[in-house]
């Protein structure tokens, strides 16, 4: 039995040795260890301490073509032409084309020849009480919406600012510089229109490669609805001969909001003054909008004389030795409105206190 087990062990040993000999005679394959590169850091090394890979990586093409375009230089290009684009189109300040037929159910000829009534003469000796008041009309208020009526009629656009500008352009009235409100420096119509210009924009025009081909200077269109405030200068006078209080409007000034190129609001700036007694004849030939009855419209001269507008006082000569506006010494807007109402009440009470009841 022992001899049998010994024989089996010798046979197994011989088989193992033969297999090992065959394996040593076959050539071995060379293997390499796969290495992974870490992304390079902006500071010369990777985020894990490995040195940065400074070799240029191959560029990859997009599925829509080569997207590795050369970067454009930020340096300004020389000899780039500048083209001034002429103004195209009309705006509300241009002359409106009149109708070739009667654009109404009736013949409207009275408005063309209408003249304002002359003021009642007040002698200097009879003017025993006078106060000067500055007001501002905000056309965004509901009562003042007729100032923004934008329809076109045979005599032009019906916005109040368009009526004033047309009269200045036709030299029917004279505009004065807004540096002061005493009507000292007259302005030419061209100078007034420059103040209403919308400004210009310089716009770069690019070619297909993204390079600047030229610059175009384009004129911004002026929006007449951007003028939504008007300043009024007036005097309240008590005439002892007729024993009544009169109010005389002296001037009207459109006020323009000014913004920076980034759209930041800077403030409201007066544009020019118009002497109201000179403008009464023009305003009597234009009718204000009446939403209740289009056939019973009053003229703009009647609207001002009958005080058919809403306004608030911004300055007065009452208790104002420093000639300051209300906003110069009253910062709160609500308190400014209350102070304006207080001034109006004092003027009203002067006349009422003259009479015993």
Image (cartoon, helix red, strand yellow):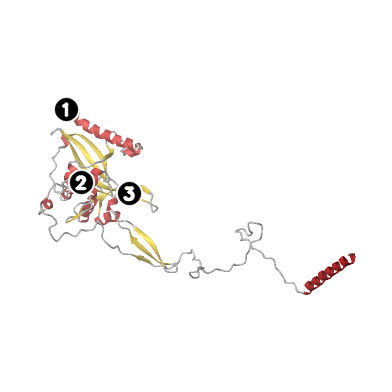
Residue 59's label in the rendered image is none
Q: Are marks 1 and 3 in contact (CB under 8 Å)?
A: no
Spot the residue most to the top: 357
Disc 1 is placed on an element classified as: loop
For label 2, count other residues whose C-alpha is less than 10 Å away and answer few (under 14), some (14-19) or many (20+).
Answer: many
Q: Taking the image as drawn, is residue 13 in sight?
A: yes
Question: Hey, which quadrant is residue 29 in on the image?
Answer: bottom right
Reading the image, the residue beneath label 1 is 355
Q: Position of residue 42 (x, y in %)?
A: 60, 59
| Residue depth check, mark 1 versus mark 3: number of the one nearer the observer | 3
Label 3 vs 2, first from the N-terminus = 3
Nearest the viewer among 173 and 321 is 173
| Residue depth check, mark 3 versus mark 2: number of the one nearer the observer | 3
Q: Is residue 10 left or right of residue 61?
A: right
Reading the image, the residue beneath label 2 is 276
Q: Are marks 3 and 2 in contact (CB under 8 Å)?
A: no
Label 1 vs 3, first from the N-terminus = 3
Nearest the viewer among 327 and 106 is 106
Label 2 vs 1, first from the N-terminus = 2
Disc 2 is placed on an element classified as: helix
Position above or below: 307 against 221:
above
Position above or below: 227 against 310:
below
For label 3, count other residues whose C-alpha is less than 10 Å away and answer few (under 14), some (14-19) or many (20+).
Answer: some
Query: Measuring 35% from the left and 62% from the top, which residue is drawn there?
Result: 217
Reading the image, the residue beneath label 3 is 257
Instruction: Specify the quadrant that holds the N terminus.
Output: bottom right
Query: Measuring 23% from the left and 48% from the top, which residue is drawn there?
Result: 147
Q: Position of residue 272 (x, y in %)?
A: 27, 49
């Amino acid at each position: 039995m022992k001899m049998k087990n010994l024989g089996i062990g010798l046979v197994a040993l011989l088989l193992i040795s033969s297999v090992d000999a065959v394996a040593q005679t076959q050539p071995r394959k060379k293997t390499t260890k796969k290495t992974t590169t870490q992304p390079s850091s902006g500071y010369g090394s990777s985020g894990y301490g490995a040195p940065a890979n400074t070799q240029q990586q191959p560029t990859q093409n997009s599925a829509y073509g080569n997207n590795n375009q050369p970067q454009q230089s930020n340096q300004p290009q020389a000899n780039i032409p500048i083209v001034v684009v002429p103004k195209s189109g009309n705006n509300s300040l241009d002359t409106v084309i009149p109708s070739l037929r009667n654009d109404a159910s009736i013949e409207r000829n009275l408005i063309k020849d209408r003249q304002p009534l002359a003021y009642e003469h007040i002698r200097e000796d009879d003017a025993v009480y006078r106060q000067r008041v500055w007001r501002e009309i905000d056309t965004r208020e509901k009562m003042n919406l007729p100032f923004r009526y934008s329809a076109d009629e045979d005599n032009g656009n019906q916005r109040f600012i368009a009526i004033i500008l047309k009269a200045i352009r036709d030299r029917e009235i004279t505009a004065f510089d807004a540096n002061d409100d005493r009507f000292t420096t007259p302005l030419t119509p061209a100078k007034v229109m420059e103040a209403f210009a919308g400004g210009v924009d310089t716009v770069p025009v690019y070619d297909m490669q993204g390079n600047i081909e030229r610059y175009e200077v384009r004129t911004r269109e002026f929006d007449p609805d951007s003028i939504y405030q008007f300043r009024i200068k007036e005097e309240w006078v008590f005439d002892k001969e007729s024993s009544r209080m009169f109010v005389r409007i002296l001037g009207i000034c459109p006020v323009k909001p000014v913004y920076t190129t980034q759209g930041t609001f800077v403030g409201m700036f007066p544009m020019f003054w118009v002497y109201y007694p000179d403008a009464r004849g023009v305003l009597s030939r234009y009718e204000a909008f009446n939403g209740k009855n289009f056939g019973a419209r009053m003229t703009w001269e009647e609207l001002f004389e009958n005080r058919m507008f809403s306004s608030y006082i911004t300055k007065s000569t009452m208790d104002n030795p420093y000639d300051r506006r209300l906003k110069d010494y009253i910062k709160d807007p609500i308190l400014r409105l209350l102070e304006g109402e207080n001034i109006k009440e004092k003027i009203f009470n002067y006349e009422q206190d003259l009479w015993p009841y």
